[in-house]
Amino acid sequence: MGHLTHDEFFTKLADVFTTRRTKAHGAVFLTQKRLSHNTNQQPTPSDPSSADPLADLHPAQPLPLLVRATNGKGKADRAAKVKLSTVVEPDALEGFYARYAEVCKAGMTALKPRDRTKRKAKAKKRKGGAGAGAGAAAVAAAA
């Protein structure tokens, strides 16, 4: 399975968001990491004991980025699992992120805000109950 072009990646990512929206549930996992599988580009130290253990944090030239997306289907729905990936070169990163943000924002329009009324009511009840109990104990001790 090869990497998609940027246009193919964005088209299929938009499709993943829309299918998730039509089924009224589901998750879309987006990950990104530095692509450093080709180690022959970077010089290796001749003496490993004197090498800086964090030398790969500051490469001589910028490394490409691997961006992945999946629809989060697990073992039960393995056939329905969608895996997308693309490689972004450092010079195309800014334009890629602009379009990536647009696609992600468009896909998140159907999200509902989390219902926090139950949690707020429970916290208010707990706060009111603890304060009243402590005040009653102080009055009883003073008498």
Image (tube, rainbow, N blue to C red):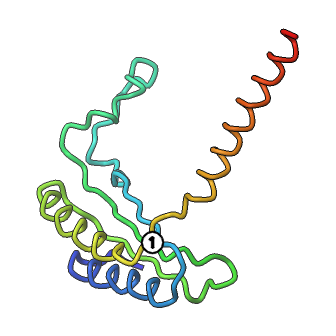
Task: Rate crowding at label 1 as few (under 14), some (14 to 19) or many (20 or more) other CA atoms within 10 Å.
Answer: few
- Which residue occupies 45% across, 90% down? 22
Query: Which x, y percent locates residue 81?
Result: 54, 82
In this rendering, is residue 135 above or below 41?
Answer: above
The x and y percentages for residue 30 are 41, 65
The one nearer the camera, 116 or 3, is 116
Q: Position of residue 124 (x, y in %)?
A: 63, 44
Say what amino acid the circle numbered 1 marks.
Lys
Seen from the viewer's position, the closer of residues 92 and 39 is 92
Residue 90 lies in quadrant: bottom left
Label 1 SS? loop
In which quadrant of the rendered image does the C terminus lie? top right
Q: Image check: 30 left or right of 14?
A: right
Lateral position of residue 89 relative to residue 108, left or right: left
Camera-side residue of 49 and 17: 17
* Residue at x-position 55% and y-position 58%: 116
Mark 1 highlights which residue?
112
Instruction: Specify whether 103 is left or right of 90.
Output: right
